[in-house]
Amino acid sequence: MIYSGSAIRVEALDNGLAELTFDLANESVNKFNALTVNELAAATDAIKADSSIKGVLVSSAKGVFIVGADITEFGSLFANGEAGVIEWTAKAASVFSAFEDINVPTVVAINGIALGGGFEMCLSCDYRVMSSSAKVGLPEVKLGLFPGFGGTVRLSRVIGIDNAVEWIAGGSEKRPDAALKDGAVDAVVAPEMLRDAAIDLLGLAIAGKLDWKAKKAEKLAPVKLNMMEQMMAFNTSMAVVAGKAGSNYPAPVLAVKTMQKHASMTRDDAMKAEAAGFAKAAVTPQANALIGLFMADQAVKKITKKHSAKSGKVIKQAAVLGAGIMGGGIAYQSASKGTPIIMKDIRSEALDLGMGEATKLLSNQVAKGRLTVPKMGQVLSSIRPTLNYGDFGSVDIVIEAVVENAKVKAAVLSEVEGLVTDDTILASNTSTISITHLAKSLKRPENFVGMHFFNPVHMMPLVEVIRGEKTSDEAVAATVKLAQQMGKTPIVVNDCPGFLVNRVLFPYFGGFDMLVRDGADFQAIDKVMEKFGWPMGPAYLLDVVGIDTGVHAAAVMAEGFPDRMKPDYKSATEIMFDNSRYGQKNGKGFYVYEQDKKGKTKKVVDPTTYELIAPVVGERKEFEADEIIARLMLPLVNEIARCLEEKIVDTAAEADMALIMGIGFPPFRGGACRYVDQMGIANYLALCEKFAHLGKAYEAPALIKTMAANNQKFFG
């Protein structure tokens, strides 16, 4: 043994070869934490000290190569400011450079995922051999960062500026064929041939049949373009990257600027430039939020795992009651992820619509090359449309997705309960109706749970699993397990009007209605909130959700929380409803909807809207963007705080992820709780006090006041 640690070992092989193996103890994957970086430095020193070594093979003992840096360590590291980040990054990058400078050829065998720091390690090697089942990439921009262990320096010299910019600013994972085409890897082989191929390549380098010294040298030198060529390449790239990233995501642009700065430098100077650029990105609020979002996602996964572990139930057969668009979407999602499903309705026309929805979604997958025609047929055959309950005696879970009417749902649920086994789980895909209330019609309320999908089902990742007063842990766990099988992220919440997502969304809509009442232009509000980061402003969102749906849900919220969600005025949204302007579904809402030349729906401003709402709005006036933001965001965030107070949702991480996945809360802001943390709890409380005259929705809840008194944060 040449070197042995807790993350890395170096062993002698035949013919003067040494193998450096990543194998992080007590972890299912390899990652670059402080321990691994330190051990890489020690292992490198050990290799350099052994004059008998003629070449080094780099490998992984796990199913992946290296998934990247250990993001859990970023918080404490980045808290030291730019100077501290530069010091840490430069130190880690110097370890990679020291390995790169080993005076023998090095070949890495990439057996699985090699992302971020994992692929930067691969770039430090002279040659890269990739398994046909592996993936590589530099996805740091998704965390508001860019590569900081030499990735921007090496990749731009290995594959050229244009390709490197696309890899780094795009942040996407690359399959073997794309990596080979761009020159990021030197060979792609079948998994079973990987090790032998890497050793053979190493042998050729040692024998002098490959110029490994030239491979090292190209990464030590400036980019092989003159200044004019560099300027043209970077100017073109910058315009494209800035256009795609937008002002809310600075990391891609910072990455390109950094690459341009160090393109004419030798490696060690270029590394200093990379460290400085990386530090600028690391201290941005966007990086803080996106890293926090990643951590919240990991926390939710752990919570979900704990929930599903409470059920020993194996869900082999599901059923959905109610076809149509929603039922068809649920059936498609279940079948496409491997769980057969029965789709039952009382009308054959509805079944045709449901099967048509599933067929359309599958056909789109085929058209995009993500699915074969035989696989499409296999998925469709696992959806069984039926007009009767004949096979319901063998289903493990039934998802009710009929019309959003409490009496109808109760009747349907009561009927199906008598036709399934005693341990079959019943789940209602309701968006507003109390699970506790619906359970009153059931003989086995402990087997009943809410399972709220978001529309469109195939695109929206969130499923709310709602626990009623009598819902058992087994029912919750089994429903969580099914949501996971369907490729969704389940978040468990307790029963209340609107549950979690709708309960916090409708105060936001209430803030919008009040602003319009007070004279704000709904178009101006939309523009401000879209600039804030929402995918669409509140008027446009209401049109997309369906104004009839919105009015119905708002009535449920008003009944449940009259002190802050029952308006004492006629709103512009109600005017739209009264005039049968339901939004996109019938072509008219706040906006009107037309088909463009490509057949896509586009929104168009309609002067009639202003005429219709004129009787219920005040004199038109302009509001500052900050006031518009505050008047919409305060009611939403305050309601999240109340949901945490009341244990509707258990953790801030789950609350933030629900908003990100359920209603498109701006990811670069990290969620409502992270938004407060970044603003500062004292500043947030002061904002509540400034607008408290607008009503109960704007008054800071007890949780916010307590946190402010103790200078606390939601995270950390």
Image (cartoon, rainbow, N blue to C red):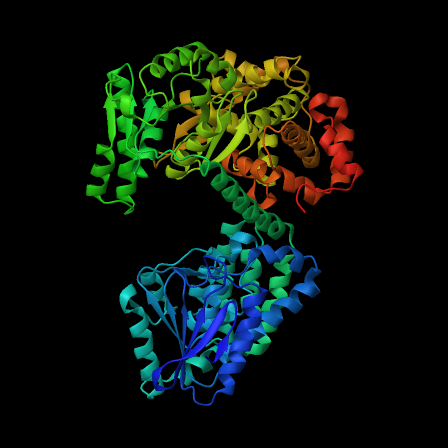
Q: Position of residue 15 (x, y in %)?
A: 34, 86
Check the image and report above or below for 189 versus 47. above
Which picture quadrant has residue 564?
top right
663 or 260, which is in the foreground? 663
Instruction: Kindly give the residue lying farthest to the right in the view shown.
Output: 709
Q: Position of residue 391 (x, y in %)?
A: 24, 22
> In the rendered view, does 8 fall on the left or right side of 358?
right
Identify the residue at image location x=45%, y=62%.
Answer: 66
Identify the residue at image location x=26%, y=27%.
Answer: 355
Check the image and report above or below for 95 versus 337. below
Number of numbered discs visible in the structure rendering = 0
51 or 156, which is in the foreground? 51
Q: Position of residue 464 (x, y in %)?
A: 49, 30
41 or 470, which is in the foreground? 470
Check the image and report above or below for 512 versus 551. below
Instruction: Kindly give the residue lying farthest to the bottom in the view shown.
Output: 51
In the picture, the quarter occupied by the N terminus is: bottom left
> In the rendered view, does 514 fall on the left or right side of 134?
right
> In the rendered view, does 402 fall on the left or right side of 631?
left
Is residue 62 in view from this perspective?
A: yes
Q: Position of residue 63 (x, y in %)?
A: 38, 60
Check the image and report above or below for 417 versus 361. above
Identify the residue at image location x=77%, y=42%.
Answer: 711
600 or 10, which is in the foreground? 10
